[in-house]
Amino acid sequence: MVIFIKLILIGIIAGILLAGFMKVVRLITGSKADILLYNMDYMPFLKKWSDYWITGILFHYATCIASAVVLFYLLIPVGREMALWPYILVFAAGGGMLYFLSALTRTPPAWNDASAWFYWTFGHGVFGLAVGLLIRFWI
C-alpha cells in the first residue's frame, strides 16, 4: 500500500513537471502543444465537461497518476520496474503516438505541426525521466 501511495505522488509530481515543461516551451516558442495536456474534446464521454478548466486539470493528473502506476506494475514481471529507460521510452513513444489524437479536435495544435509534435514527445520523455528517477530513488 505504501508503494501504491508513493506511485500516486510520483504521478502527481511528474505531472507537475510535465505541465511546467510544456508551459516553458510555450513561453519560449509559442507552440500550443501544452493545450493537449488538458484537452478532452476527442473523447465523446468526457467532451461534455471540457468547457470547465478544472476537468482538464483533473484529466491531466489522473492520466499522469494512472500511467505511472500501471507502467510500474507492468514492468515488475520483467524485472525492469527500477530501470529508467522503460519509463522514458514508453512515455515518449506513447505521447508521440497519442499526439495525433489532435486530428480529432479543432483545438490547437494541428495534428501535422511537426514542432508541436516534437515538443510534446520530448516533454513526455521528460515525464518518463521524472517518473523513472522518482521511482528509483523513492521506492
Image (cartoon, rainbow, N blue to C red):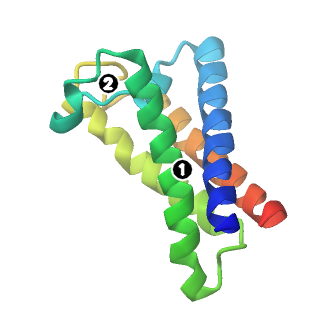
Kind of residue at disc 1: Ile
Q: Is 33 placed left or right of 80 in the picture? A: left
Q: Nearer the viewer, residue 94 or 66?
A: 66
* Identity of the residue drawn at 68% across and 35% down: 17
Q: Residue furthest right?
A: 137
Kind of residue at disc 2: Ala
* Pointer 1 residue: 65
For residue 58, what is the image quadrant?
Answer: top left
Q: Residues within 10 Å of mark 2 (few under 14, many from 20)?
A: some
Q: Residue furthest front?
A: 1
**Which quarter shows the N terminus?**
bottom right
* Identity of the residue drawn at 57% across and 77% down: 75
Q: Residues within 10 Å of mark 1 (few under 14, many from 20)?
A: many
* Pointer 2 residue: 110
Q: How many marks?
A: 2
Q: Is 64 placed left or right of 55 in the picture? A: right
Tell us which disc is closer to us: 1 or 2.
1
Instruction: Tell me if residue 44 comes above or below residue 28 in the rendering.
Output: below
Q: Is residue 117 visible?
A: no
- Residue 27 rendering spot, x and y as whole percentages: 63, 12
* Identity of the residue drawn at 71% across and 72% down: 83
Instruction: Tell me if residue 27 comes above or below residue 38 in the rendering.
Output: above
For residue 69, what is the image quadrant?
Answer: bottom right
Residue contact at pointers 1 and 2, CB within 8 angstroms: no
Q: Nearer the viewer, residue 58 or 33?
A: 58
SS assignment at label 1: helix
- Residue 89 rendering spot, x and y as whole percentages: 57, 61
- Residue 10 rendering spot, x and y as whole percentages: 67, 51
